[in-house]
């Protein structure tokens, strides 16, 4: 890799861009939901709004009905990768 910008700095910049885009997208989603129209037609895109119900399983409540062995039998383990970013404030002050 020949980029003069460090990988951590590129990742942090991209992360901030994603956060800004997600915030802008949330505002647009809220506007679309508030309109309640099933279809919005633009010059370049058609956006459809679908409403449905979702059922969720309350694992905490289920644990009250299950034995410890049954809980273990129903539990799945997965590998999760987590990347955290914190700004290097001292580097910004020095620059």
Image (tube, grey):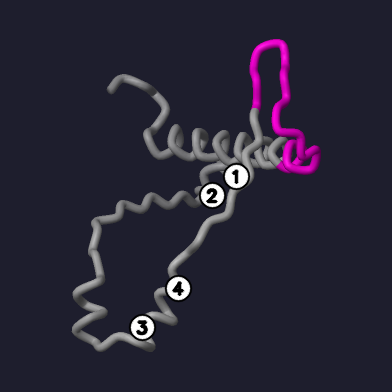
Q: Earlier in the sequence, mark 3 or mark 4?
A: 4
Looking at this view, name the residue that lies furthest to the top: 43
Question: x, y percentage for residue 71?
Answer: 26, 79
Q: Which residue is mark 2?
A: 90
Which range of residues does the magenta coloring cover?
Answer: 30-47
Q: Are marks 4 and 2 in contact (CB under 8 Å)?
A: no
- Which residue shows up at 58% across the image and 41% down it? 19
Where disc 4 sits, the SS reads: loop
Q: CA distance from mark 2 to mark 3?
A: 48 Å
Q: Earlier in the sequence, mark 1 or mark 4?
A: 4
Q: CA distance from mark 2 to mark 1?
A: 5 Å
- 49 magenta-colored: no
Q: Are marks 1 and 4 in contact (CB under 8 Å)?
A: no
Mark linked to residue 58: 4
In the image, taking residue 51 as reference, residue 36 lies left or right, namely right
Mark linked to residue 93: 1
- Between 19 and 38, the residue placed more toward the observer is 38
In the image, taking residue 88 as reference, residue 51 lies left or right, namely right
- Between 47 and 50, the residue placed more toward the observer is 50
Where on the picture, by quarter, is residue 41?
top right
Q: Residues within 10 Å of mark 1 (few under 14, many from 20)?
A: few
**Mark 1 against mark 4, which lies toward the viewer?**
4
**Mark 4 against mark 2, which lies toward the viewer?**
4
Q: Which residue is mark 3?
A: 63
Question: x, y percentage for residue 47?
Answer: 65, 26
Where disc 1 sits, the SS reads: helix
- 36 magenta-colored: yes
Q: Does residue 38 sit above or below 4 in this rendering?
A: below
**Mark 2 against mark 3, which lies toward the viewer?**
3
Q: Earlier in the sequence, mark 1 or mark 3?
A: 3
- Which residue shows up at 19% across the image and 84% down it? 69
Q: Are marks 2 and 1 in contact (CB under 8 Å)?
A: yes
């Amino acid at each position: 890799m020949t980029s003069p910008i460090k990988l951590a700095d590129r990742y942090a910049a991209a992360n901030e861009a994603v956060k800004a885009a997600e915030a802008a997208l949330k505002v647009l989603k809220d506007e679309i939901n508030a309109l309640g129209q099933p279809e919005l037609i633009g010059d370049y895109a058609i956006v459809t709004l679908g409403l449905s119900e979702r059922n969720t399983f309350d694992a905490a409540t289920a644990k009250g009905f299950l034995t410890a062995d049954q809980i273990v039998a129903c539990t799945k383990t997965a590998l999760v990768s987590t990347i955290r970013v914190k700004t290097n404030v001292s580097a910004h002050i020095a620059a």
